[in-house]
Image: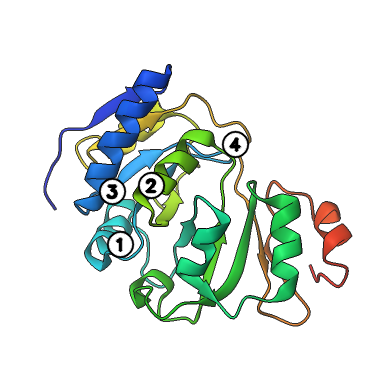
Amino acid sequence: MKDLQTETIELSSESSIQKAIKLATEMIDEGEIIAFPTDTLYGLGCNVFNESAIRNLFEIKNRSFTKPINVLIGSIEQLSYVAENIPIIVHEVIREFWPGDLTLILHKRGEIPSILTNGMSTIGVRMPNNDVTLRLIREIDKPLATTSANISGRPSITNANQILENFEDKIPLILDGGVSEIGEESTIVSLVTEPPSVIRVGSLPIEKLKRIINNLEV
């Protein structure tokens, strides 16, 4: 894998944010992987429709190809880019919890590269509660295949300095948005099972979910 010179942009002003979004958009369109803040943890991401970029994402993270990678979207409209046969309950759930720290397992669209999900017919989708990252994804108008910005098996990363320690010269760009607001993984819920089920207990309390999904299994 080629070595890159890593640039870090501190998101400290509107002009720096605009610069970061412009550069990040160009890099992602070219098939690169970048790091960026979300409300939960920092993420590594690439164009969800670029199979080569997704493969590189697995490799730089040392992540097993048997472990699916989730997707971040920037708007409700982008949900249809990655998911299909969406259950009615989804709309009620996302009205309550998106943008936020909830990942939903849904039926995957056929256009999504199978490498992303280890050939499975489902996909994890989230809309993060981070203004810069939402603006970036909307500007690209493509969801991002995204995984937490750490080497597999190592602690989660909550600031840009930690990313630089792990991925310097492996990715071209880090967007520095300060320390992660939540600092914990999102909760994951499958809405393709009957009844719906919790796949991972994360930062969003199960009790809040049960107010909307009455038959949720933990």
Counting residues from the N terminus, which is met first, the one under dot 1 or under dot 3?
A: 3
Q: Position of residue 155 (x, y in %)?
A: 49, 42
Amino acid bearing label 4: Gly
Q: Position of residue 156 (x, y in %)?
A: 50, 42
Residue in view at x 44 percent, y 63 percent = 69
Q: Which residue is mark 1?
A: 54
Tag shown at residue 98: none
**CB under 8 Å between discs 1 and 2:** no
Counting residues from the N terminus, which is met first, the one under dot 4 or under dot 3?
A: 3
Q: Which residue is mark 4?
A: 183
**CB under 8 Å between discs 1 and 3:** no
Q: Which residue is mark 2?
A: 44
Residue in view at x 42 percent, y 54 percent = 146
Residue in view at x 58 percent, y 38 percent = 39
Task: State the separation of the CA atoms marked 3 and 2.
Answer: 7 Å
Q: Residues within 10 Å of mark 2 (few under 14, many from 20)?
A: many
Counting residues from the N terminus, which is met first, the one under dot 2 or under dot 4?
A: 2
In this rendering, the answer to whether 6 lies above or below 184 is: above
Q: Nearer the viewer, residue 181 or 48?
A: 48
Q: Which residue is mark 3?
A: 33
The C terminus lies in quadrant: bottom right
Judged from the image, the secondary structure of the residue bearing numbered disc 2 is: strand
Mark in front: 4 vs 3: 3
Amino acid bearing label 3: Ile
Q: Is residue 149 visible?
A: no
Q: Position of residue 101 (x, y in %)?
A: 64, 48
Q: Nearer the viewer, residue 82 or 164?
A: 82
Q: Is residue 107 visible?
A: yes
